[in-house]
Image (tube, rainbow, N blue to C red):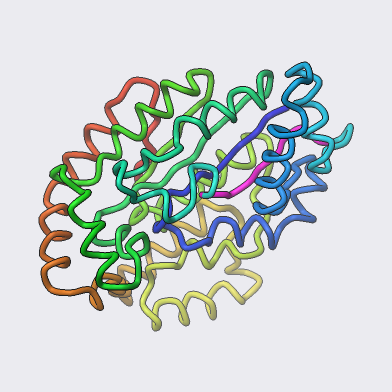
């Protein structure tokens, strides 16, 4: 069995990939791809760890796939579940950034899927884009969390090394979240596998995520004509790029805008090291970086 897991990170795609999977569950199933709801997947993992702890690992793995809904026609299981690495509260805790409970969760994946061909997909992002989603809503909680970030930027490379250490048999694919409108064909292609076509429902939402309102409207009108419809993911990506050049891209919202000034200054300082951190991450052995063509 092939198992492809989009593990987040928290604060990146706001559930866009999970929504695309859910909207195309029937089409994916017809291609032999099982797409269980993330909550069901996490619950079944917990049950297997709890109730099946004394079972033979291979027998337990087979029972787990069956409990998820796999049958004789299923060749691949895909899930988008950032909760695999912990809750939002765990991502930024006193232990550090993606430290609390991460090793245990990765070890659990390793023991639950001893024979599956495992692919992990993970987006990273600039601190000013990711951290506002992780910080507590109350000022006291924010004041306690921000000092945890003692590095010059978010230590994405350290998280990747932790994943590689605990899941050495898995393939790890990473990208910058801000690049998703340009690399979504590769990301979704890694999810569904090389032999499956990308179901079309919801693709435009990913492809045109950074287009201006005018560019999106004009693109929708253009591709609504049968003779202009995009015939492939690559063609849709190129059309989006062309309309972006002609009619502009949207300015991304600033998730840190509502935060106190001193926190915004700290996030700006962390942002300064983001490109270097991405370069370090992309250069790690065993990490495959997805970058715009």
Which residue does the image show at 31% across and 52% down from the upper left?
125
Which of 102/285 is in front?
102
Q: Position of residue 68 (x, y in %)?
A: 79, 42
The question of residue 77 being in magenta is answered with yes
Q: In the rendering, at what x and y percent does residue 164 appear?
A: 42, 24
Q: Nearer the viewer, residue 203 or 93?
A: 93
Q: Is residue 135 above or below residue 277?
A: below
Q: Residue at x 44, y 42 (%)?
A: 122
Nearest the viewer among 95 and 24 is 95
Q: Where are the magenta residues, as a range? A: 74-82
What residue sits 72% from the left and 35% below the top? 76
Work out which residue is located at the far right of the displayed protein and give it.
Answer: 72
Q: Position of residue 82 (x, y in %)?
A: 51, 49
| 61 shown above or below 235 | above
User: 43 left or right of 94?
Assistant: right
Residue 260 magenta-highlighted: no
Q: Could you tell me which quadrant the N terminus lies in?
A: top right
């Amino acid at each position: 069995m092939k198992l492809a897991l989009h593990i987040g990170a928290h604060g990146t795609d706001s559930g866009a990939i999970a929504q695309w999977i859910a909207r195309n569950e029937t089409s994916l199933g017809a291609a032999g791809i099982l797409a269980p709801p993330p909550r069901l997947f996490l619950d079944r993992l917990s049950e297997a760890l709890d109730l099946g702890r004394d079972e033979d690992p291979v027998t337990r793995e087979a029972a787990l796939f069956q409990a998820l809904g796999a049958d004789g026609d299923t060749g691949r299981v895909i899930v988008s579940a950032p909760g695999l690495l912990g809750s939002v509260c765990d991502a930024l805790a006193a232990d550090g950034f993606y430290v609390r409970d991460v090793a245990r969760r990765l070890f659990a994946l390793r023991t639950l899927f001893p024979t599956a061909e495992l692919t992990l997909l993970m987006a990273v992002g600039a601190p000013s884009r990711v951290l506002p989603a992780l910080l507590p809503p109350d000022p006291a909680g924010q004041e306690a969390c921000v000092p945890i970030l003692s590095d010059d930027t978010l230590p994405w490379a350290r998280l990747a090394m932790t994943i590689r250490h605990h899941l050495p048999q898995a393939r790890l694919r990473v990208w910058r979240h801000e690049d998703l409108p340009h690399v979504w064909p590769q990301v979704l292609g890694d999810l569904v596998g090389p032999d499956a076509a990308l179901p079309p429902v919801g693709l435009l939402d990913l492809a045109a995520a950074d287009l201006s309102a005018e560019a999106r409207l004009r693109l929708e009108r253009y591709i609504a004509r049968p003779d202009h419809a995009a015939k492939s993911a690559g063609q849709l990506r190129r059309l989006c790029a062309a309309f972006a050049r002609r009619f502009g891209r949207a300015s991304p919202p600033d998730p840190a805008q509502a935060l106190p000034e001193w926190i915004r200054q700290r996030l700006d300082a962390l942002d300064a090291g983001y490109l270097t951190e991405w370069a370090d991450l992309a250069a790690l052995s065993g990490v495959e970086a997805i970058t715009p063509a």
